């Protein structure tokens, strides 16, 4: 059996860590003795979350859609903590509704944050880790990396892309001492999921995902399902012939066109899918 990796003393950076799943991951990392940099578009909340997480946590500005901003965030984390052992690419946004009603700006934003934000983080941090021959990148994807809920067409496409990108990069760097994990949670109680249906499954808490992330850091593996039982279901789904797959999807994957409450989601989507506060780093606001 492989020994568990010690998290005490590690330096970690968590994107989109001001609230929701990222905040829970940051809190649990601090509790395990890691030093954590929380980066978020909402710096004030990131600072409050860091202060509440305890000693060794700092809150910083980050827009994952800007290479300059991402590089400054990673540099600041490294300066504050002396190294960077773990990057958790967690920042993400979601629009829900019939595909033909999705504003193009919302579709582009989801790919920009979810897919390109994750790829950008990997391009910036992996060369530093590969040079040292150690480190771990954890990408928070989604069960929508494996299934395709009605009403989440672009979101699911962006999360499929995160899975594909992560798998391909992993194949490139195999055997060089650096780990990549893709975390795939079902529906979690956060602002992003407000007004959506969790179907027959239990609605998870952010701590459920945080615990799975810490477990993957201690015992590295590529695919991490939350809850863990979804692994078997996902493999059955992937191996099924098309008609059985459709029947499984109808029974198990909530149809968000029919079941989500778009009124309840309006405020989240207005805030989360607006363009970046400072898209080109010039200080001009796009909001
Ligand atoms: N909530 C769910 O049901 C669920 C399920 C599976 C996967 N996920 C994934 O988990 C991750 C976290 O989502 P959450 O549910 O905690 O959402 P959330 O909305 O509660 O938190 C997301 C955080 O990311 C930040 N963020 C958004 N765009 C950013 C950007 N450009 N740069 C930096 N920070 C940015 C937001 O300010 C916010 O603090 C996302 O990748 C999401 O897709 C969520």
Image: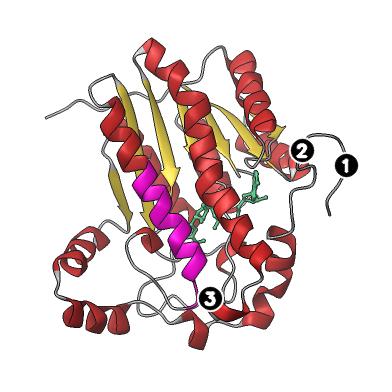
| Circle 3 residue | 196
C-alpha separation, residue under disc 2 versus residue under disc 3: 33 Å
Q: Is residue 110 visible?
A: yes
Specify the quadrant that holds the C terminus: bottom right
Tell whether position 180 is magenta: no
- Residue range highlighted in magenta: 151-165
Q: Position of residue 142 (x, y in %)?
A: 41, 57
The reply, left or right, for residue 124 in relation to residue 75 is left
Evaluate if marks 2 and 1 touch, with contact meaning CB atoms under 8 Å apart. Answer: yes
Does label 3 point to a residue whose CB lies under 8 Å from ligand 1? Answer: yes
Main SS, magenta residues: helix
Which mark identifies residue 284?
Answer: 1
The part of the image, by quadrant, that contains residue 32 is top left
Evaluate if marks 3 and 1 touch, with contact meaning CB atoms under 8 Å apart. Answer: no
The part of the image, by quadrant, that contains residue 222 is top left
| Circle 2 residue | 280
Question: Which residue is situated farthest in the right direction here?
Answer: 284
């Amino acid at each position: 059996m492989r020994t568990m990796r010690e998290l005490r003393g590690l330096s970690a950076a968590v994107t989109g860590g001001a609230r929701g799943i990222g905040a829970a991951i940051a809190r649990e990392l601090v509790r395990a003795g890691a030093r954590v940099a929380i980066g978020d578009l909402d710096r004030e909340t990131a600072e409050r979350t860091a202060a509440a997480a305890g000693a060794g946590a700092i809150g910083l500005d980050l827009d994952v859609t800007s290479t300059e901003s991402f590089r400054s965030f990673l540099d600041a984390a490294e300066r504050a903590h002396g190294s960077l052992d773990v990057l958790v690419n967690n920042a993400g946004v979601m629009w829900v509704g019939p595909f033909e009603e999705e504003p193009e700006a919302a579709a582009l934003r989801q790919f920009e944050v979810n897919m390109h934000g994750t790829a950008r983080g990997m391009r910036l941090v992996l060369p530093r880790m590969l040079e040292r021959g150690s480190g771990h990148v954890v990408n928070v994807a989604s069960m929508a990396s494996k299934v395709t809920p009605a009403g989440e067409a672009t979101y699911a496409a962006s999360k499929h892309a995160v899975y594909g990108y992560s798998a391909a990069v992993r194949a490139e760097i195999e055997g060089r001492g650096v780990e990549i994990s893709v975390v795939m949670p079902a529906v979690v109680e956060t602002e992003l999921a407000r007004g959506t249906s969790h179907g027959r499954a239990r609605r998870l808490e952010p701590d459920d995902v945080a615990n799975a992330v810490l477990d993957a850091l201690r015992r590295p593996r590529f695919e991490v399902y939350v809850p863990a039982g979804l692994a078997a279901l996902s493999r059955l789904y992937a191996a099924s012939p098309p008609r059985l797959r459709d029947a499984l999807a109808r029974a198990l994957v909530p149809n968000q066109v029919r079941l989500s409450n778009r009124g309840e989601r309006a405020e989240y989507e207005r805030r989360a899918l607006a363009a970046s506060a400072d898209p080109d780093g010039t200080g001009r606001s796009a909001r």
